Amino acid sequence: MRVLHISSPKTWRGGEQQLLYLVEELNQIGVWQLVLCPFNSAVHKYCIKNHINHLTYFKGFSANPMVAFRVNHICKREGIDLMHVHDSHAHNFAVLSTVLTKNTVPIIVSRRVDFPVKDTSMSFYKYNHPNIAKIICVSQAIADIMEKSIEDKVKLEVVHSGVDLNKFTNVPKVDIRKELGIDSEYALVGNVAALAPHKDYETFIATAKQIVGQGHKVKFLAIGDGPSRKQVEEEIAKNNLEDHVLLLGFRDDVVSLLPELDVFLITSKTEGLGTSILDAQVARIPIVATRAGGIVEIVKHEVNGLVADVADSKQLAAHVIRLLNDRTFAQKLVEAGADMVKSFSKGMTAQKTKAVYNRVLRGNAESE
């Protein structure tokens, strides 16, 4: 089995982490792989640093035919059996390769976002192209959404994203309170999420306002950066929360920061699955989350976390306060989460993905 992974983002977010987790775990179980990514991208740099088999391309734009021709050339030269595309533009390049060069290598699509396929003929064509062998959805919520746009439902598979269960073992300590000048009497509530519209930082800030307004000594930390930073800063200022909601930006010491939180709060209005929540469970942090997308598949209310409706800042605030006040109950949720997350290891994701690959190749062999 020889697999070509195609990635298109130049930056690093959850999808890129999942791609490299998958590559590393599949390497461990004997799958030959090659990563094709944009030159000088975050994935490119990671592959160099970690000695991962890779090639690069110059992206140009989202439907660049030159990339499609490069994909075809690599498939022929390397004897590729499967193409696994990890984002929308990578999907474009693989389908274009089929259309422009008659590339017959089957395509596996990873779908990580929980919003519908665009209602256009081009999007419909892209997702229902005959060369698409499987669409791997990272949650059942995504699979349910995709059903409306996919003619052959058999192509839909659910393989949950996985995390590194040893990620927080023997990590260096960081004194974030000292760094930010936060007294020990303040609890720390925060998350790890891009500053992007679907993460709904408006609700995160509204939740903070409710808690601070009730006199609770809490500081809110947002770890991450993104296109909505200016709007988030304006929302914080509008609510006079500059001293209470702190934007830490992108940090490369998240594994040290996350365990410092007293509560993990995520207020997304859409969420494919929520691997940052899985990380929080590994780090043994009690969780408050919204019922967005696949979150409900990994957070069971009053079992391993507390959930509220999307945009319900009043209920989210009540949940946070409950966990801060009842540490025994919070610890009960933590223990349940630590046990549940064992089913979401990156190794398990790789095993299930390989099984999808095998079904595709076996089906192709039987049809020949």
Image (cartoon, grey):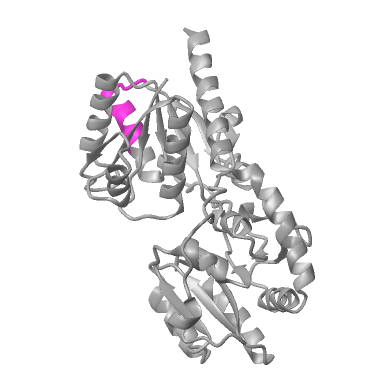
x and y percentages locating residue 247 in the rendered image = 44, 77
x and y percentages locating residue 216 in the rendered image = 67, 88
Asked which quadrant contains residue 44, the reply is top left
x and y percentages locating residue 75 in the rendered image = 29, 24
Asked which quadrant contains residue 55, the reply is top left
Of residues 207 and 174, the one nearer the viewer is 174
Q: Quadrant of the N terminus?
A: top left
Q: Residue at x 57, y 32 (%)?
A: 352
94 inside magenta stretch: yes
Q: Is residue 285 above or below residue 88?
A: below
Q: Is residue 234 visible?
A: yes
| Horizontal relation, residue 106 to residue 72: left or right | right
| Horizontal relation, residue 299 to residue 121: left or right | right
Of residues 339 and 203, the one nearer the viewer is 339
| Horizontal relation, residue 242 to residue 325: left or right | left
Q: Is residue 306 above or below residue 353?
A: below
Q: Is residue 140 visible?
A: no
Q: How many marks?
A: 0
Segment tinted magenta in the rendering: 93-104
The dominant secondary structure in magenta is helix
Q: Residue at x 24, y 20 (%)?
A: 77
Q: Is residue 256 above or below residue 65?
A: below
Q: Residue at x 56, y 66 (%)?
A: 259
133 inside magenta stretch: no
